Image (tube, helix red, strand yellow):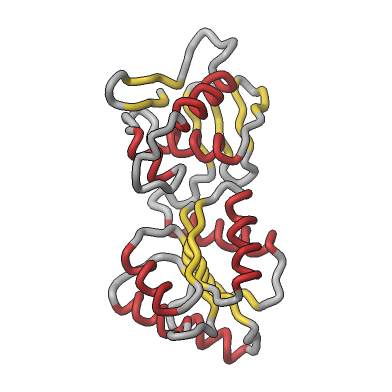
Amino acid sequence: MKILLIEDDREAASYLVQALDEAGHVSHHASDGETGYAMASGMDYDVLIIDRMLPRRDGISIIESLRAEGDSTPVLILSALGEVDDRVTGLRAGGDDYLTKPYAFSELLARIEVLARRSSPNEGETGFQVADLTLDRLSRKVARDGKDILLQPREFRLLEYLMKHSGQVVTRTMLLENVWDYHFDPQTNVIDVHMSRLRAKIDKGYKTHVLHTIRGAGYMIK
């Protein structure tokens, strides 16, 4: 998932961004409300995590403006304000969920995964299958012919994106933007290296290969 965190506590934000990245997600951070609103308006995210009390512009104002513009991106509100009236205010402003500080990261992760599933065009879809290769998005398990395959977070994200677009050509630009969050070509062989590692894990030893290089175009899972 691609996640925007709008949080003015830099230490807490740094911890959360790192934890989200380690969980296999792409996360961006804004430390004030105006910057966060601009980023939320100008880029596509799967989930927004917004603190209520922010400098320059408060979280409730951000949510209300996004909803008024027709932006339906799921929003998880983070706040030290945990009274019933506070939660009601946040939800009525357009928030989809409300989590009170302090919180456990495992709970926050579960909540944003639920929000992303609700908003997905393939609602309720928790995994993908191509031939005998399966990927479960909830347990983050990959298997082929019933045998578990251990993938690193980036490899999992890469395979998830390829399987989500199975039967379609996925270009290098698409991979850089959606798996590495690069909006420029770093002029490195990072894709080739990861693709080689992934191919060795999911295709080596099998008669039928599912990961294909489409010369001059990109890659395809089929």
State the image coordinates of residue 195 (x, y, percent, origin top left): 48, 26
Q: Is residue 92 visible?
A: no
Report the residue that reaches farthest toward the bottom.
Answer: 85
**On screen, residue 103 above or below 58:** above
Q: Seen in the image, is 156 located left or right of residue 12?
A: left
The residue shown at (40%, 23%) is 222
The residue shown at (47%, 59%) is 118
The residue nearer to you, when weighing 178 against 71, is: 178
The residue nearer to you, when weighing 207 against 42, is: 42
**On screen, residue 148 above or below 153:** above
The residue shown at (44%, 79%) is 33
State the image coordinates of residue 114 (x, y, percent, origin top left): 55, 59
State the image coordinates of residue 150 (x, y, percent, origin top left): 66, 30
When asked about the image quadrant of residue 105, the answer is bottom right
Report the residue that reaches farthest toward the front.
Answer: 187
Q: Seen in the image, is 22 located left or right of residue 128?
A: right
The residue nearer to you, when weighing 187 against 80, is: 187
The residue shown at (70%, 71%) is 103
How many numbered tags mark residues here?
0
**On screen, residue 133 above or below 135:** above
Q: Is residue 199 visible?
A: yes
When asked about the image quadrant of residue 175, the answer is top left
